[in-house]
């Protein structure tokens, strides 16, 4: 799959591209006032606003609808910013196109549903408009990629992904856990696909936006989508995470944009470190294979002596001992526990296989 670079469909965009605007369009004054302040920030090239809002429960504010699209065209006329809105149904697509919206985006609650995605993708066949695809609510990379593929198959090639974090039942400081490894894997599997980060929906709280944005830049993401409102505390939706256009300007000024490539000396040193990492990984693989061979041997031995596979007391002691040693060596507890658990599961699996094949030593 080929993806044209962002610069080819967002004229004048520099790194990082910033898309900003309110979670929801509320009134013509609010929309225009936000857009005018944002247009003064050099990074902002696209104005966003939610026109149809996906709400968890009915009866809450569900967006201003078509009236908001008229305000968006005024934004375009008066500020020169491109405009983008969220679409979830083919009739949204049609309305947005009728009102000359420049870019569409598909929200996290729509991307989870392959039927909705297919229907949207088909409604876009033959329509020449860029589309941004948020990650699905749940941490499922294939679903995210599937949504992108459905669009691509229907002739939409100007696509960007937006990382907005994932629902997790475990409570953390984030509204949606970033699980950075998922967008990183997306970048690896779909090279050339522009990936933006939405620090607002990851954070759920304005105090985290700077830090999440910095992390996105350090991971070489192409830009940010940030919710901005002239009076965030009074916003009708997502008020805790919205920031003023002025705060967005400050955040951008404080971002450290590191070079993707350093000078030759830096590259050489980095190469040496990478080489060391390679050797350590190979050694780890060799040792893991050796450990699993011993597990197999133990399986055969236990089978021959009619002994159960899982020896709970031994596992408890082994686990506590390794955690203690790992702690001393400065390893993170949660990391080490997960690793030990994986290795243990695999070795139980190997022994189970031996038992079910009925092999004796
Ligand atoms: C939004 O951008 O306002 C929105 C509803 O986002 P998401 O689909 O990421 O929840
Ligand atoms: Mn929002």
Image (cartoon, grey):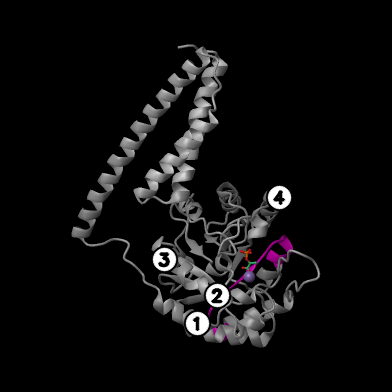
CA gap, disc 2 and disc 3: 18 Å
Whether residue 214 is visible: yes
Nearer-N-terminus badge (3/1)? 3
Regarding residue 190, the answer to whether it shows in the image is no
For the magenta stretch, what is the residue range?
77-94
Please report contact status of discs 4 and 3: CB closer than 8 Å, yes or no.
Answer: no
Q: Are marks 2 and 1 in contact (CB under 8 Å)?
A: yes
Q: Which residue is mark 4?
A: 115
Judge whether residue 29 is colored magenta.
no
Q: Give me the residue at 39% from left, 32% from top.
A: 288
- Image coordinates of residue 281 in percent, x first then y, are 33, 40
**Residue farthest to the right, as pictured:** 59
Identify the residue under disc 2: 206
Q: Residues within 10 Å of mark 2 (few under 14, many from 20)?
A: some
Disc 4 Cβ-to-ligand 1 distance below 8 Å: no
According to the picture, the residue beneath numbered tag 3 turns out to be 217
Quadrant for ligand 1 reads bottom right
Q: Identify the residue at the far left of this view.
A: 265
> Mark 3 packing: few (<14 Cα in 10 Å), some, or many (20+)?
many
Q: Earlier in the sequence, mark 2 or mark 3?
A: 2
Query: In which quarter of the view is residue 243 placed?
Result: bottom right
Local secondary structure at mark 4:
helix
Query: Can you identify the residue that label 1 sits on?
Result: 247
Q: Residue at left 40%, top 79%?
A: 253
């Amino acid at each position: 799959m080929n993806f044209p670079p962002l610069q080819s469909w967002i004229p004048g965009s520099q790194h990082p591209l910033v898309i900003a605007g309110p979670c929801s369009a509320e009134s013509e004054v609010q929309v225009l006032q936000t857009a005018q302040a944002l247009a003064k920030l050099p990074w902002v090239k696209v104005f966003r606003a939610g026109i149809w809002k996906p709400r968890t429960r009915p009866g809450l504010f569900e967006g201003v609808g078509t009236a908001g699209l008229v305000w968006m065209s005024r934004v375009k006329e008066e500020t020169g910013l491109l405009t983008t809105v969220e679409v979830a149904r083919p009739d949204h697509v049609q309305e947005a196109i009728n009102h000359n919206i420049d870019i569409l985006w598909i929200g996290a609650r729509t991307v989870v549903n392959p039927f909705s995605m297919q229907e949207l993708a088909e409604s876009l066949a033959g329509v020449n408009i860029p589309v941004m695809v948020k990650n699905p609510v749940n941490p499922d990379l294939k679903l995210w990629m599937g949504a992108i593929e459905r669009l691509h198959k229907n002739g939409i090639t100007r696509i960007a992904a937006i990382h907005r974090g994932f629902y997790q039942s475990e409570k953390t400081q984030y509204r949606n856990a970033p699980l950075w490894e998922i967008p990183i894997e997306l970048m690896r599997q779909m090279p050339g696909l522009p990936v933006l980060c939405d620090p607002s929906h990851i954070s759920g709280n304005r105090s985290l936006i700077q830090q999440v944005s910095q992390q996105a830049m350090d991971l070489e993401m192409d830009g940010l989508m940030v919710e901005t409102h002239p009076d965030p505390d009074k916003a009708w939706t997502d008020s805790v995470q919205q920031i003023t256009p002025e705060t967005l300007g400050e955040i951008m000024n404080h971002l450290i944009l590191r070079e993707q490539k350093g000078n030759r000396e830096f590259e050489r040193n980095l190469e040496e470190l990478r080489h060391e990492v390679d050797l350590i990984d190979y050694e780890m693989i060799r040792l893991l294979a050796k450990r699993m061979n011993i597990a197999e041997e133990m399986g055969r031995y236990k089978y021959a002596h009619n002994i159960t596979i899982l020896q709970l007391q031994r596992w408890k002691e082994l686990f506590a001992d390794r955690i203690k040693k790992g702690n001393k060596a400065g390893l993170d507890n949660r990391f080490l526990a997960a690793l030990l658990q994986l290795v243990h599961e695999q070795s139980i699996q190997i022994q189970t296989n031996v038992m079910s094949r009925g092999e004796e030593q």
